[in-house]
Image: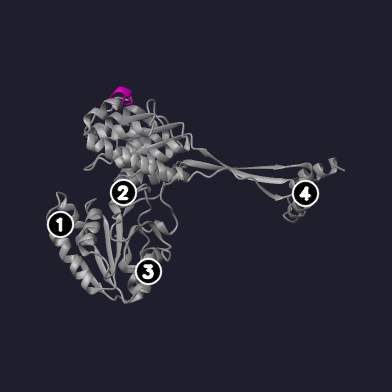
Amino acid sequence: MKILSFPPRATWPALLARPVQSTETIEKAVAPILEQVRTRGDQALAELSEKFDKIPYSGIPVQHDDLAAAESQLSEELKTAIQQAYQNIRKFHEAQRQPVEKIETMPGVVCWRRSVGIEKVGLYIPGGTAPLFSTVLMLGIPAQLAGCREIILCTPSDHPAIRYAAQLVGVTKLFRVGGAQAIAAMAYGTASIPKVYKIFGPGNQYVTAAKMLVAKEGIAIDMPAGPSEVAVYADETAVPAFVAADLLSQAEHGADSQVLLVSTSKKVVTTVNLALVTQLERLPRRDLAAQAIEHSKAILVENQDDAIDLLNQYAAEHLILSVDKAEEVAERITNAGSIFLGNYTPESAGDYASGTNHTLPTNGFARAYSGVSLDSFVKKITVQHISSDGIKVLGPTIEAMAEAESLLAHRHAVSLRLASLE
């Protein structure tokens, strides 16, 4: 890990910039895939699945009996872990429900807002080197709580843990199909896969490009996404071995993962670097992790104020605060996807089972985007009711404003009612 000591503030933007990824080439490759699925439906899905994933596409959703059978293929230990994670994630997201509250803005004028689940949602689960059944929980549980009528899941993986989790969260149809072609199928609909109103889930650069392209056509997606990332702020109270483990847990996602260490202590940075070398050798995915660590940075800053300013500029997907009075420091963080406090709160906890959602904004989008929550799966519909007394009080205000904007039909809609009450 490259150590940068007290870099001038003017250099921070360049130091914190994520590697530039050219999307033009990827989009040129993905656009024809989208068009094939749009125009040729299941036939294109079958051809593309065979070409890219080397699996046949039957057009038939995974049957309920196959989902139920997945339970018997898992160890009791793993089933217990998944059920515990399910309970924690559900409990945290259930608390995000908001009761309807009617507000009388003035006598006779009552306004309120109600949440309505998005009727049809699509969940994408990658099937690469890691079967992300945890993401099935993270996306499926809030969809279940929101009351989404159709929850469509697409994945090239046939891992039993994915199927078991899908059954737990109430997935209505699961199709074994992956890549950009799966995103296209959920965006446009085919004879077998229903068209959905919003698409969720991580994926490689081709899946991400497909999501971004269909978003331009009006299909809602969860958020822009990129390679996973973690920033760790560590001071003398941090345990260097823990910090190194947290950095590596993110680095093992892939060679393009982003890893950043910020500290006010040169001793901490040096010790963490030594621990990284030792721990890296033990990892089965050390080659991927090593590539991520190779282009990562450790930044030594003068004081806590500089550390906080730098971290807010970076806007990490995951931010670990291994510092004294971590909760107080967290109050000064304005840009982060999710924050982890203290020496005993690893980022892995949020990835799996503490209860918070692990689908988070990357690539600096935490400056403006939130992670996935119950709200991601609902629409907020406002409702209002005005009584005859209420329109008498509010009407003149509307008339004056409508006339000032030269929208006389708007004024007339109010004036007619007021006249009828005279």
Q: Quadrant of residue 385?
A: top right
Mark 2 sits on what residue? 351
Mark 3 and mark 1 residues within 8 Å of each other at the beta carbon: no
Residue at coordinates 23% horizontally, 43% vertically from top-left? 130
Mark 4 sits on what residue? 395
Mark 1 sits on what residue? 280
Mark 1 and mark 4 residues within 8 Å of each other at the beta carbon: no
| Mark 1 vs 4, N-terminal side | 1
Q: CA distance from mark 2 to mark 1?
A: 20 Å
Q: CA distance from mark 3 to mark 4?
A: 50 Å
Q: Indicate which disc residue 308 carries.
A: 3
Disc 1 residue type?
Leu
Helix or strand or loop: what does disc 4 sit on?
A: helix
Disc 2 residue type?
Asp
Residue at coordinates 22% horizontally, 69% vertically from top-left? 269
Give neighbour class at mark 2: few <14, some 14-19, many 20+ (Cα, 10 Å): some
151 lies left or right of 49: right
Q: Nearer the viewer, residue 288 or 408?
A: 288
